[in-house]
Amino acid sequence: MRKAISIIIYGLLMAIVYLVYTGVFSLVEILLSIAIGLIIAYIFAGDIITDLSKLSLSRIYHAVAYLIKYFTVIEARAHWSVIKIILSRNTNPKPAIVRVPFKADNPYTIVFVANSITNTPGTVVVDMDENKKAYYVHWLTPISLNDDDAYRSISLEFEKHLTKVFE
Amino acid sequence: MRSKSFPVICLITTISIVLILAVLLNLSGLTTYGVNELTGLAKLFVLNIPDPTKPWSSHAFEIVTAILWDQRGFDTYFETSVLFLAIVASVALLSSYGRRHMPESTGDEYTTMIVKVITKLVVPIIAVVSASIAIHGHLTPGGGFQGGSVFVVAPVLILLAYGSRFLSSRGFNEVRLLAIRALSVTLIFVVGLVPVLYFLTHGTAYLFQNTYKPDSAFTYPYLIPTPIGMILTAGSIMIYNILEFFAVAAGFTLAILLLTREFERGGKK
């Protein structure tokens, strides 16, 4: 039963992807998209939806709120700090690779925090260790090489928001 | 040794190459084109294939796909067969020896969680898009081969992120893939043979014929009325595209699966 619901939800999501890619919204096309979405979901939904009981409106709200904040405020701040370095006459900002620990357990949280770090200019996740629970981040303007300081200034904000979405 | 005049020489060379190419393109007429300047054969195709009032129409908007499956469908069938033989040859080469004690990889040793999760999210989207490309092959650029090739990106990503065991555990084993491949190619030929049955019982029809011709009444249904609206299938072109999609997707997935297994064994017997 639970599997059937997750297949239907994921199938409808895939149907939307199909419709947006195709660009035609006739009734025939919508029925076709649902059929194809359900076939795809039958194969993949079990791997992608790990816990259906976590699905709730508040999580979706947090996800949308995080996306809006990320692509406006956080990205703008990170871009501005890199623009300052580019325009300054300091040709060696002394970058470093620091270890940033994470506390999350869910793979989706861990991956999306890592991608959030990489997508903001100035920080790139170059590797991660799942057993030691740490990212290795190349940091253009390191404030501190200490693990906790790095955690606080790089990933605390991402992890705080994404924990509400995925954990 | 790089002299001081080196950048100047580079600049002059670049500018002169650009100028020469521009003059050549302009003189050869490649920069301007229009329907009026089409050559004879192209004009024949462009004016006849998409126009349902013409006797030689294929009732398909995508002319390239229509030419591939209608005007030269027999040729395309043998192209598909050549690909099929190549896949059969690679199966014969790769799966014949040392399959028993092969530890199949789970991919843990060469990817991180980031690669795995993102692959998991992207793969279904690739599959959906490839299905759209194949199904609309007679309406928009694309078709069965193109859709199948796009689909194969998904198994490649899975094989790189998770290793070959994941694909096998999801039912993509080599026996089944080869069966899908063989069945699709056979069905393409059967669809092409149907006009011949018509020829034997009723009257004139041609091998791999799609819609009616001036001297032949045989036609696949190209515009199907349903309660929810008209469906334009362009005759057999849509059937061919869907079958070719499965044929190409299964065939390439099989070849890549076998190659990845060989790679994971690292040349050990």
Image (cartoon, rainbow, N blue to C red):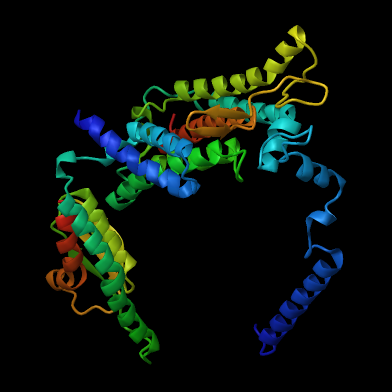
Q: Quadrant of the N terminus of chain B?
A: bottom right
Could you tell me residue B37's position as x and y percent?
Answer: 84, 56
Could you tell me residue A98's position as x and y percent?
Answer: 23, 69
Location of residue A63 with respect to B22 vertically, above or below: above
> Residue shown at 52%/29% (left/top)?
B246
> Residue shown at 73%/40% (left/top)?
B51
Location of residue B187 with respect to A152 vertically, above or below: above
Could you tell me residue B136's position as x and y percent?
Answer: 56, 39
> Residue shown at 37%/38% (left/top)?
B163
Residue extending farthest bottom: A89
Location of residue A1 with respect to A24 vertically, above or below: above
In screen coordinates, is A127 left or right of B33?
Answer: left
Count the labels in the image: 0
In screen coordinates, is A62 left or right of B165?
Answer: left
Instruction: Indicate the quadrant where residue B240 lies.
Output: top right
In screen coordinates, is B86 left or right of B123?
Answer: right
> Residue shown at 70%/22% (left/top)?
B219
In-front residue for pair A15/B4: A15
- Residue B264 in sight: yes
Location of residue B39 with respect to A134 vertically, above or below: above
In screen coordinates, is B22 left or right of B118?
Answer: right
